[in-house]
Image: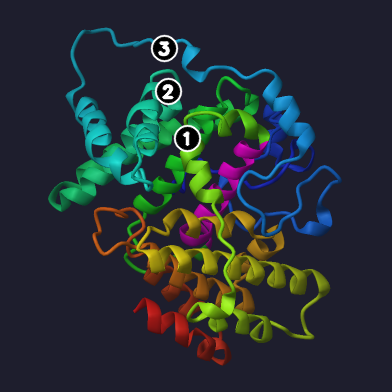
């Protein structure tokens, strides 16, 4: 979402940007959201996780044991203290909080269960009263949603949302320097809201800069998974469990039994070229495999009439860093793969726009960006995505 206050993407501070070296940030930092500087697999250190087609939050057993030894109740942290000099109420912020708990939270609860609803409506709000960045994120999402609900006041609410978003993001990035069991829940919850904000804060009027408008939220998704990996067991055993269970749900189904899987599998042939170096070919192959897996899961859910938005978000998490490099370079084969992913985004856009308000219109928006970027010789491979999205 936010295109401001960004730092360049890297993994660890030893290999990171000069700004984070100066600030001594020893933390994974895909949240910086500056596409085009992701590390390729050949540059991974022995301790770096390898990309693949795993589920969100995959982590080693050793890390699981370490994180489960000192589990801290996140709600035992001290509440925020107001610094206001007067007793005047901020009616605007109160309106935003009311709107979030009564309208936005039920929309975000994709699984309509008491636990899923309480995640955003009760627990996230309660935790926000202990972490400034999360509270700002909650208010920002509510503001952008009000701008969606009341188009005549969109400019006003977008400004309010952008202000809360910028302040919250700055505090969030500072807190990333010292992630522990006491703040990992709030950091992960905020990172999820950041993904919503990335969609909601874009105007989508016309294709603009591909790196900032499209790739930005890919990095946000990967950043959320990094926080999860650092304290996987702590987060999974908390109120966030319903969200993670839904994202990691997987069903085994033969691809040939589902319609249009051949449109995904043919990408292996389309993207196979002797001109690709070994690293590029491997990145494309992994990305198509992951897309096929995500396509199958989304197809099963769609056939049942269930929402597919969380399943759709799994694909960017699993992308190899090299593939993101290729997208940043607008490499034709990678862009064609992305175009096919647009069909999944389109599926995630509900018929009732109120349910998926922040993502609506993005499938067409990204596809138009791809159409403007790929050479004429590759346009024929966009026929299926174009036919299904438009």
Circle 1: is it few (<14), some (14-19), or many (20+) Cα within 10 Å?
many
**Of label 3 and label 2, which has the lower sequence position?**
3
| x then y, percent, for residue 16 | 73, 42
Label 3: state its secondary structure: loop
Query: Is the residue under label 2 in contact with that under label 3 (CB below 8 Å)?
Result: no
**Of label 1 and label 3, which has the lower sequence position?**
3
| x then y, percent, for residue 285 | 71, 72
Label 2: state its secondary structure: helix
User: Which range of residues does the magenta coloring cover?
Assistant: 211-229
Which label sits on residue 127? 2
Q: For the stretch drawn in magenta, what is the main secondary structure?
A: helix
Circle 2: is it few (<14), some (14-19), or many (20+) Cα within 10 Å?
many
Question: Is residue 237 visible from the viewing direction of this image?
Answer: yes
- Residue underneath mark 1: 189
- Residue underneath mark 3: 79
Query: Is the residue under label 1 in contact with that under label 2 (CB below 8 Å)?
Result: yes
| x then y, percent, for residue 104 | 28, 41
In the displayed structure image, the side of residue 94 where residue 212 appears, left or right = right
Query: Which residue sits at x=25%, y=59%?
Result: 353
Circle 3: is it few (<14), some (14-19), or many (20+) Cα within 10 Å?
some
Q: Is residue 342 above or below residue 67?
A: below
Q: Is residue 340 above or below residue 119?
A: below
Q: Is residue 376 above or below residue 164?
A: below
- In whole angstroms, how far apart are the C-alphas of marks 1 and 3? 17 Å
Please state which of residues 15 and 241 is positioned toward the viewer in this rendering: 241
| x then y, percent, for residue 376 | 53, 90
Please state which of residues 120 and 186 is positioned toward the viewer in this rendering: 120
Query: Which residue sits at x=28%, y=53%?
Result: 355
Residue that lies at the very extreme toward the right in this rendered image = 46
Counting the numbered discs, the total is 3
- In whole angstroms, how far apart are the C-alphas of marks 3 and 2? 9 Å
Quarter of the C terminus within the rendering: bottom left
């Amino acid at each position: 979402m936010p295109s401001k206050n960004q730092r360049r993407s890297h993994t660890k501070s030893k290999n990171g940007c000069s700004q984070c070296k100066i600030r001594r940030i020893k933390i994974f930092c895909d949240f910086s959201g500056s596409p085009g500087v992701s590390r390729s697999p050949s540059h991974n250190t022995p301790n770096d996780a390898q990309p693949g087609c795993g589920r969100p939050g995959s982590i080693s057993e050793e890390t699981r044991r370490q994180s489960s030894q000192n589990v801290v109740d996140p709600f035992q942290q001290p509440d925020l203290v107001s610094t206001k000099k007067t007793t005047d109420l901020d009616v605007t912020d109160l309106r935003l909080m009311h709107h979030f708990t009564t309208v936005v939270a039920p929309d975000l609860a994709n699984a309509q269960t008491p636990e899923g609803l309480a995640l955003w409506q009760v627990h996230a709000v309660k935790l926000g009263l202990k972490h400034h960045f999360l509270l700002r994120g909650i208010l920002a999402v509510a503001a952008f949603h009000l701008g969606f609900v009341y188009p005549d006041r969109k400019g006003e609410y977008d400004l309010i949302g952008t202000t809360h978003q910028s302040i919250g993001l700055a505090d969030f990035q500072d807190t990333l320097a010292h992630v522990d069991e006491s703040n990992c829940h709030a950091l992960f919850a905020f990172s999820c809201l950041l993904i919503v904000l990335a969609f909601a804060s874009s105007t989508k009027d016309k294709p603009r800069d591909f790196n900032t408008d499209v790739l930005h939220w890919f990095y946000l998704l990967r950043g959320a998974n990094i926080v999860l990996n650092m304290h996987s067991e702590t987060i999974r055993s908390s109120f966030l469990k319903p969200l993670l269970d839904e994202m990691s749900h997987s069903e085994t189904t033969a691809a040939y039994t589902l319609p249009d899987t051949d449109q995904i599998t043919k990408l292996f042939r389309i993207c196979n070229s002797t001109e690709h170096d070994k690293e590029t070919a491997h990145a494309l192959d992994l990305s198509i495999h992951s897309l096929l897996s995500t396509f199958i899961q989304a197809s099963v859910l769609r056939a049942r009439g269930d929402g597919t938005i969380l399943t759709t978000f799994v694909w960017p998490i699993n992308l190899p860093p090299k593939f993101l490099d290729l997208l940043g370079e607008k490499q034709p084969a990678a862009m064609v793969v992305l175009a096919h992913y647009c069909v999944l985004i389109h599926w995630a856009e509900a018929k009732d726009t109120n349910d998926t308000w922040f993502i609506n219109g993005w499938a067409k928006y990204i596809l138009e960006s791809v159409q403007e970027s790929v050479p004429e010789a590759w346009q024929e491979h966009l026929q299926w995505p174009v036919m299904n999205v438009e």
